[in-house]
Image (cartoon, grey):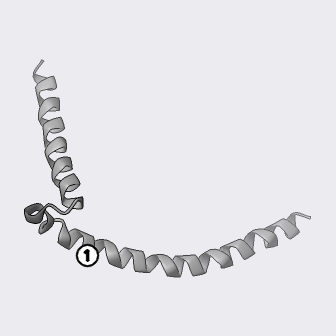
Amino acid sequence: MGGSRILYVIVAIIIVVGLGWYFGLFGGQQIATAPAPPSVTTAPPATSTPPDATSAPSATTTPPASGSSGN
């Protein structure tokens, strides 16, 4: 029975954190100040996606090459 008590604590923590994040997304004034730095960190990764998109075309050129070697 003691193990299930730990489960409840974990679930409670997840709910509290989730609610804080959820309301942060909706721009709660006090809570929004905390999520603001994380969202700034999310922007740079988005910038790294365009380079990947450029390498994707080159990746598509490789499959035809292996296809011709199969013939």
Q: 51 left or right of 42? A: right
Image point (14%, 30%), residue name: 8
Residue type at mark 1 is: Val
Image point (66%, 77%), residue name: 57
- Of 3 and 16, which appears nearest the observer? 16
> Which image quarter: residue 56?
bottom right
Could you tell me residue 17's position as x and y percent? 16, 49
Could you tell me residue 47's position as x and y percent? 41, 80
Q: Residue furthest right?
A: 71
Q: Which residue is mark 1?
A: 40
- 32 to 7, vertically: above or below: below
- Of 10 and 23, which appears nearest the observer? 23
Q: 30 left or right of 7? A: left
Could you tell me residue 50's position as x and y percent? 50, 80
Mark 1 Cα-neighbour bin, 10 Å: few <14, some 14–19, many ≥20: few
For the C terminus, give its image quadrant.
Answer: bottom right
- Of 17 and 33, which appears nearest the observer? 33
